Amino acid sequence: MAIPNEQLEAARMHKRWSVNVASEKVGVSVNTFNRWERGLQVPQLSTLDMVCRAFNMSPEELGFAQALIAKRRSKLQAREKAEPVTDSTLLPVLPTPPIEETHNTITIAQHSLCKPSAAQTERRFERSGQLHNEEDGREEDMLKEQLSRRRAITTLLGAPVGVFGLGQGGSSKLLHPAEIISLCEASIPLAWRLYFEGGLDEVNQTLPAYLTQLTKLAKEPSYYQRRATNLASQGYQLASLLASQYQNFGTSANCATQALAFANQVQDPHLQTASLIRQALVYFYLKRPQQRLRAYEQAAQHSQKASALLQGRTHIGLSETHSCLGNELEAQRHLELAYKTFPEHYEEDPAFSYTHFNHSSLLGHEGIMYLNLDYPQQAWENFDQMDKELPKTLIPDRIELTVRQATASYKLGERDQSCHYVEAAVRSSLITGNQLRYNEAYDIYEKLRQRWNKENKVKELSALF
């Protein structure tokens, strides 16, 4: 049984902060902060540092003493099992910064962005296996289908990292800037592809090395500076997306801001638009529609000189945001513009390699728009179409779709169907370590429990959490 964190609540009350204010100060969602106070979840070590800075208090004073001990023990056990050194330090999670067009840069350390510990990974697989032994074979087959390709791409990404010499203080004297740029031009698109094929942890381990090299070259005036800056913006956009999947929204926002700074440095409207879309996505997860709207409106200004893919993605983002704010007419107008401008052969668009926006991106945001406007049947039809288009493997888009299907089913009053999709979403999230989708599935479970609290199907879901 969960024990509420009364010390955290008392600290918040002492500051006279509401949960909304506290979550904003820390840089996490309201739901995440609520779960901390209710004792249903504890922060990761990097996030715990962020909480302590916001309250100017120690972990012990905030009621996280035992969590701190347990997490440190997990990290120690991970090191004893010879886990890579890159797992031992996490990128600092800072409060979400305002959207500003700035040329300042954020220095990135040589470590992973937000990787779970080995002990956490083991627990995920063990827990998932306990819950669904009868489906282990099918899940194993799904993982094997992705494994060979992911290993090949990971090997290609990992080889330059060793040559960069990051273990010896970040020096890359072995390679000429031209060689580093050539490696990054091949590897950054590969990293994007690997992420969308489900290789979150693999990208998490290799991407920081590339960002370190590109950031250094982007700061130094040279023949290669513009190419390095362009690639750095693409890389930080991916870092933002990756951090959000682990609910490190402070890191995610910082990376999106850094991506925009590099895009502004080269005055590239494609990169500027894409970076602002990543900022808007952070605000989507933090449930801040006004800030999301401002980000998309800035993106719309830059998108006038950008590719059709980015124009269409900006319009569908504006459509969803306006629906969240209750502006149905504006939502419908931007929906029409999105389908009018989005290219049929999106994979040929110059921005596709560092965005991977596709037809499912349109369908997904349109479905969320319908959910916001309380049209669940239309939303379900969109998600059903996505279901036919997406691979039946554990990729990020598939897991997100499962969460959306659970939401639509709930709004349609389909109890058993809702339970099925919640179960599938949790199972997939546990296997892939996707904390964001796990918590979204939990939110839907809470709604199911309030609506059908006496139904066995709903009661059985409690074992998942």
Image (cartoon, rainbow, N blue to C red):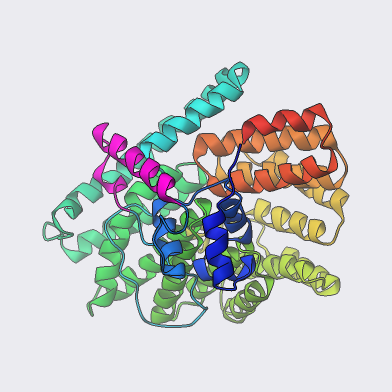
Q: Say which residue appears at 82% left-offset and 73% top-offset.
A: 327
Q: Quadrant of residue 213?
A: bottom left
Left or right: 368, with 157 as reference point:
right
Q: Say which residue appears at 28% left-offset and 48% top-offset.
A: 86
Residue 349 visible in the snapshot = no
Stretch of the chain drawn in magenta: 64-89
Front residue of 314/2: it is 2
Q: Is residue 107 above or below residue 398?
A: below
Front residue of 227/121: it is 121
Front residue of 55/331: it is 55
Q: Is residue 284 above or below residue 297?
A: above
Question: How many labels, in total?
Answer: 0
Is 382 a magenta residue? no
Residue 47 visible in the snapshot = yes
Left or right: 15, with 316 as reference point:
left
Q: Is residue 134 above or below residue 225?
A: above
Residue 182 x, y percent position in the rendering: 27, 59
Residue 168 x, y percent position in the rendering: 13, 54
Q: Say which residue appears at 28% left-offset and 45% top-offset.
A: 158
Is 74 a magenta residue? yes
Q: Quadrant of the N terminus?
A: top right
Q: Quadrant of the C terminus?
A: top right
Q: Quadrant of residue 224?
A: bottom left
- Dominant secondary-structure state across the stretch colored magenta: helix
Residue 106 x, y percent position in the rendering: 34, 72
Left or right: 421, with 202 as reference point:
right
Front residue of 117/191: it is 117
Residue 383 x, y percent position in the rendering: 75, 46
